[in-house]
Image (cartoon, rainbow, N blue to C red):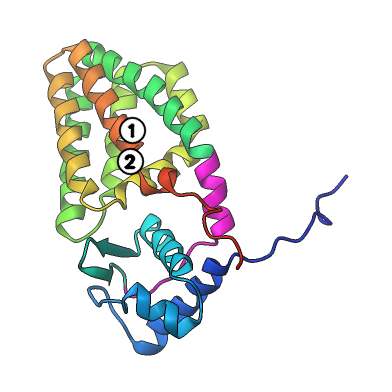
Amino acid sequence: MTDALRPMTKQRLYEQVLNRLRQYVTEGGLRAGDRLPPERDLAARLGVSRASVKQAIVVLEVQGLVEARHGGGTYLLRDTLDVEPVEQLVERRRRLPDVLDAREALETKLAELAAERRTEDDLTAMRSALTHMAREIDGGGHGVEGDRLFHGAVTAAAHSALLAEFMRSIADQIAESRTESLRQPHRPTRSLAQHQAILDAIEAAEPRRAATAMRRHVRTVAKVRLLDWDPDDGRPE
């Protein structure tokens, strides 16, 4: 059996709006900080409903490309609107809850064990990771590499070969959830503060406090616009 001849799907109208908006930004030379035309104007100029424009804007928000300010318009966060294909977003949205469940179960235990077993070298690695993340954020980045280093250092500090192997087995999915979380508005600085709370508990050798801090952090990671987005809320007109 093959799904090569599966039924063709008609492109959602808001996907066509996305393509036009990307073209508009490119041809107009817009840059981060510039404002898009109001939704009402976009709908009139494109000849579509305002609902389709709104759904396109939501997709751009989900991908961290624009910021819609309540009552203040929509502003570019990047110099381009290089939109990820909607079907890839849909697939990631489907698998993300399972990844987040696995992260909470595994990383909460890893933080607890790290508080019991960490060495001075482990603590040094965690501190170094947070310094790296802070530098990334100060430089205008999201702190993705520092985040990866920190969680890797916590895993190493737990000194559990089997749990470390479980983490490696879902490393790609964890990376997706990390990127998704850190591109939420104001999330990098909040994540950095939560990492510091985890480190403080591990350094103090308080397993329950470390587990609680990690659980709180992973539940923050789970709060992303992608999971609130309904990909079918914008069917072809």
Q: Could you say which is closer to the camera, residue 194 or residue 234?
A: 234
Instruction: Reply yes or no: does residue 58 show up in magenta.
Output: no
Within the image, what quadrant is residue 78 found in? bottom left
Image check: 200 left or right of 223? left
How many marks the image carries: the answer is 2
Residue under label 1: 152
Quick one: label 2, few (<14), some, or many (20+) residues within 10 Å? some
Q: Is residue 102 above or below residue 115?
A: below
Residue under label 2: 148
> Mark 2 falls on what kind of element?
helix
Image check: 141 left or right of 11? left
Quick one: label 1, few (<14), some, or many (20+) residues within 10 Å? some
Specify the segment rendered in magenta. Answer: 79-94
Q: Could you say which is closer to the camera, residue 120 or residue 44?
A: 44
Q: Residue at x 24, y 58 (%)?
A: 141
Q: Is residue 66 above or below residue 116?
A: below
Q: Quadrant of the C terminus?
A: bottom right
**Is the residue under label 2 in contact with that under label 1 (CB below 8 Å)?**
yes
Q: Amino acid at mark 1?
A: Gly
